[in-house]
Image (cartoon, helix red, strand yellow):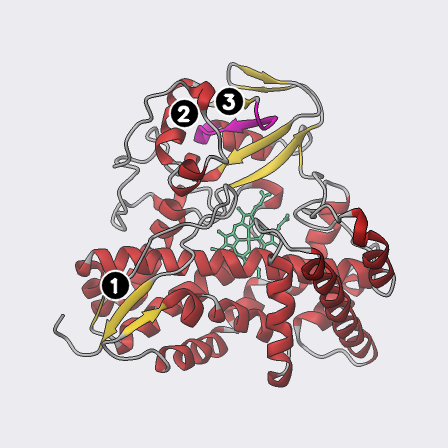
Amino acid sequence: MTSTPAHSVDEFDPLDPQTLQCPHAWHARLRAEAPVHFVASRGMWFVTARELVAKALSDHATFSSAFGLPQMPIPDSISDEVEKIQAEGWPPVPTLLTADPPEHHYYRRMLAKAFTPRFIAQLEPEIRSIAQDLVRAIPNGAPFEVVRGFAAPLPLRVIAKVLNVPDDRIDDFKRWSDQFTATVGGQLDDAGLLEQARNMVEFQKYFAAQLDERRAAPSDDLLSGLVTAHSMDDDDEPLSTGAILNIIVQLLIAGNETSTKLITGVLHELAREPKYWDQLREHPSDRSADLIEEGLRFLTPVQSMFRITKADATLGDYTIPAGQLVVLVFGSANRDEELFSRPDDFDPDRGNAKAHLAFGAGIHSCLGAPLARLESRIALEELAARFGSVRLGEDNDFAYEPSFMLRGLHRLNLVFAEGEQR
Ligand code: HEM
């Protein structure tokens, strides 16, 4: 259980360092006293009750996703130089996460044609072989930092496979991916920002050339699916290179950090409660599914997302004026005691974990959910196939990355051991 803060809800600051480390008690307080709450110091409205979060998600006409691309302001000192670098690439096109209908429907329809459940399901053998590779490299009975060694490389290599990045470009791909996330919740100095701009353009040129190749000779991969998606429907325009590049960036950002944080968080819970590891060893496929679903509810790696009100919006007894920045707190909705009993307990047997909003809902609901579920289930299954036990290692600070949107441990030392005895 988390303790309830003594102060009034007016003192809630989502960016307070302590709150960033553990926001749950504040969320419970907000749900009880002010489920729609204006945080004046930050100019943001926080929606924390499940029912109201779900209502806002279903009303995309009022709660718009066109909140702009999350970008760092570029300091004047280097803005000319950054612009010169960017001029060699493609300007950003807002597509899925940051687009409203009708553009959103178009981009979503196009990606959905290529990124089908069937396409994802047939990745299973590849994902399993990537997971097995990573599991083989884990030391037996010795400390192992699981974020860097397992939970981050797994989704990265899976996305690389989805995008058909050849093995000799994996290091470049990792560098580009790291560069995209460097400014999500972090700061870069001038040299770092210039480096980031160069990497973005390098990434764009690499994938633009790949897209040209697929246009000339389509195969059965995702890039081919994106360049040919329009041909399945006479009314659709082909996706522009700029739009596909943006979709690829969204797949990288939406798909990597999120799955990393889910896998890390579930392993943290397993290391704390040995009986779950034993159950996982006994019934790997069923148990991994339960553990991942409850992990999604309990951990909620995407803690919240922005919306902008297009008009005055009524949520329950509250009215949010037009033009306001709203934060839909999925992490709080997933611990709403109206729906989930003992919400602060990690309980894979709760039965209704799947009612969580960890993947959002409505028109923006996560397109990668089947892939996230598949890769994280395989991660658990392959770890349990080799190791008889897992426990917490020494030297853990259990510090979370300081973001109210993406929640996860920045590192986690575990000790995996082969054999039946713990
Ligand atoms: C545990 C892993 C993941 C979590 C918790 C997660 C969570 C979410 C959430 C909450 C949204 C909705 C955002 C909103 O309403 O504004 C979303 C959207 C999205 N996710 Fe995921 N995601 C995960 C993994 C993935 C993966 C693996 C991919 C693809 C490779 C992916 C691709 C997307 C895309 C493209 C969207 C935008 C959909 C749209 O706007 O129509 N996600 N995700």
The magenta stretch spans which residues? 41-51
Q: Nearer the viewer, mark 2 or mark 1?
A: 1
Mark 1 closeness class: few <14, some 14–19, many ≥20 residues within 10 Å:
few
Helix, strand or loop at label 1? It is loop
The residue closer to the viewer here, 372 or 196, is 196
Separation (CA) of disc 3 from disc 2: 8 Å
Residue 347 position, x and y percent, is 26, 47
Q: Earlier in the sequence, mark 2 or mark 1?
A: 2
Is there any visible trace of residue 239 in the rendered image?
Answer: no
- Is the CB of the residue bearing disc 2 within 8 angstroms of ligand 1? no
- Choose top left, top right, bottom left or bottom right for residue 115: bottom right
Residue highlighted by disc 2: 31
Q: Quadrant of the C terminus?
A: bottom left
Please, what secondary structure does the residue beneath circle 2 have?
A: helix
Of the 4 image quadrants, the one containing the N terminus is top left
Query: How far is the residue under mark 2 from the one under mark 1?
Result: 36 Å
Callout 2 touching callout 1 (CB < 8 Å): no
Residue 45: in magenta span: yes
- Left or right: 270, with 367 as reference point: left
The disc, 3 or 2, on the residue closer to the chain's N-terminal end is 2
Residue that protrudes farthest toward the top in the picture? 317
Q: Residue at x 78, y 58 (%)?
A: 243
For badge 3, the amino acid type reads Val
Secondary structure of residue under mark 3: strand
Type of amino acid under label 1: Glu
Residue pointed to by mark 1: 394
Q: Residues within 10 Å of mark 2 (few under 14, many from 20)?
A: many
Asked if residue 79 is positioned above or below residue 381 in the image, the reply reads above
Name the residue beneath numbered marker 3: 36
